[in-house]
Amino acid sequence: MNMLEVNNVSKIYGSLHALSEVNLTVEEGKWLSIMGPSGSGKTTLMNIIGCMDKPSLGSVILDGQDITQLSLPQLTEIRRDKIGLIFQQFHLVSYLTALENVMVAQYYHSMVDEKEALLALERVGLAARAKHLPRQLSGGEQQRVCIARALINYPKLILADEPTGNLDESNEAMVMNLLHQLHAEGSTIIVVTHSPEVSKHAQTTVVLEHGKVASIINN
Amino acid sequence: MQEITIANLAWRNIQRRPFRSCCLIIIIMLFSATLFGGSVLMKNLSLGISGMANRLGADIMVVPYGYEKNLEVALLRGEPSSFYLKADLIDRIKVIKGVEAVSPQLFIASLSAGCCTSKVQLIGFDQQSDFVIKPWLQTQLSQPLTDQQVVVGSKITSNVGDEIKFFNHSFKIAAKMDSTGMGFDTSVFMTIPAAQSLMKAANLIEGDTDHFVNYVSSIFVKVDPDYQPKDVVNQMMPKYAIDYNIDFVMTKGMLSNISKWLNGFSTIVYSLSAIFWLLAIIVIFVIFSSSLNERKREISLLRILGASRSDLVKMLLRESLIISALGGIVGVVIAGVLIYAFSLLICQSIGLPCVNISITDGLIYALLVFLLTLIIGPLSSIYSALSLTKFDTYQTLREGE
């Protein structure tokens, strides 16, 4: 079963075609990398897949539902229920502790469960740092909190935007290891990256250039 | 057990940004303290003045020429003063058309007394004709005051039954007065003969020491309701003003001057409160707007995590509501404590009578000021809250990366 189908998707800003007739399919449980240089349309595509933007043309079917037909509040619901987001800059709430940052995702999803949030932090090796504010954590630790937050609501799709872009080698390895664990447990993963090293972890790599799919590589 | 709700998200933001939060709270506190403190002080003053008007009883007070101010300060502030006019004027005033009652008082400024740290005003009053002192007595005297007994004002620290000494004469305290908010609170009342004997001891009148019986300080006149006080004064003035070298203090005139002053004072207080209110709204608006960029990412992130726009507007408004509530409570409490501690001192320093408002009235004032304060935060942050939640979410989150 396909987790994601992107059919002839274009995104047009005035005369600029950020995406032109992009097609791709991701089966459930697969790991896909979207690679390309800056300005190739990676982020635009991620916005559309992540229900944060709508395409100008084409359709996107996520977990069997055409998300291009949905209103903004409906897209918010889909994002909340089905997608776990991991960011390059971590984007933790500065005045909340690591634990609270995980719990806030639970709060907007359904209900808060402190034990479960602690387990998620334990899984990324940060149970001991649960009460620390983001500024008291290293970049690698912040990224791991971000991963714990992304997986707390058991999303069907994990969408990671340059997840290792701000990390050193050892933290990069730790984060990739975590993604492998999630993948092994059956999560569908899409990683947007400009790094060939990171993209090699995926089963399939889609290379974007000038808003178009330039090639699809099976690793 | 940790909880995450809109309310405690707002609270954590306030708690973990202490400098910003404290600045906002202080601004709001200034507003609520000014409004609450000013309002209560004005109410205390107006209660003191209306109490004085209602219970002083006299419409006209006759004093020696040039001593009108002395009487005013003696009545309003209790500043001790001694002045005298001839007592035979009493009988002459009694027969004037429109005069309902006449009662003399004899003022003596004491040098010191065991009861008091400062000089007090000693007032001799005529028990038979008195209509000024009696209404203030806490309990009626079972028997008329003897020449060895006194009635003390509410702020004299001695109690009923205690002894008190003036000019080496000992007196027993027979009764204590209610709080008047006026100079009566720091005065001691005795019979006119007792006051006269003190005058003799103090050697207050030169050259006529054997005829103290012929002097009083002030004559309180109550006018028949069918007559105007000014008509009565107009009858007395040509007949006695020059011969007796006297002047007339009209209670209403004295109080209307105070009322005018009070109106001016209330205008200042309310203007200041309005300025603080506007200032608080503007400052919070500016601070919330200027933190727009800082908070854009946080808000966008929460939206990405699934918060609806209304969730976020509620959170931001809740945050400003908490700041307003804290500022409001702190302001009201601080002003309340200061006013409770210093109200009478303030009234004395500005020379006006005042009476503390009741606890119920105080609570009503506090509640009204608190409600007015509560509006400030949400009113000044609603625009920022709505603007903050309008942004394109992920683009905003990645700005500057």
Image: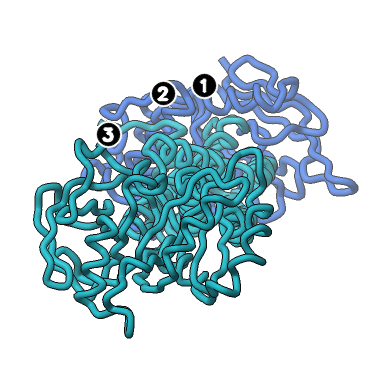
Chain colours: A blue, B cyan
Determine if marks 3 and 1 fall on one subunit.
Answer: yes
Q: Residue at x 68, y 53 (%)?
A: B231
Whichever of labels 3 and 1 marks the residue nearer the N terminus, that label is: 1
Q: Residue at x 25, y 56 (%)?
A: B190
Whichever of labels 2 and 3 marks the residue nearer the N terminus, that label is: 3
Q: Residue at x 90, y 48 (%)?
A: A15
Chain letter for mark 3, please.
A
Mark 2 surroundings within 10 Å by alpha-carbon count, few (fewer than 14), some (14 through 19), many (20 or more):
some
Q: Which mark, residue A14? A: none
Looking at the image, is B118 positioned above or below residue A206? Answer: below
Circles 2, 1 touching at the beta carbon (< 8 Å): yes
Which residue position is annotated with label 3?
A118
**Residue A47: x %, y % from top left:** 65, 38
Q: Is residue B266 visible?
A: no
Q: Residue at x 16, y 52 (%)?
A: B173
Determine if marks 2 and 3 fall on one subunit.
Answer: yes
Quadrant showing the C terminus of chain B: bottom right
**Residue A31: x %, y % from top left:** 50, 33
Q: Is residue B148 left or right of residue B231?
A: left
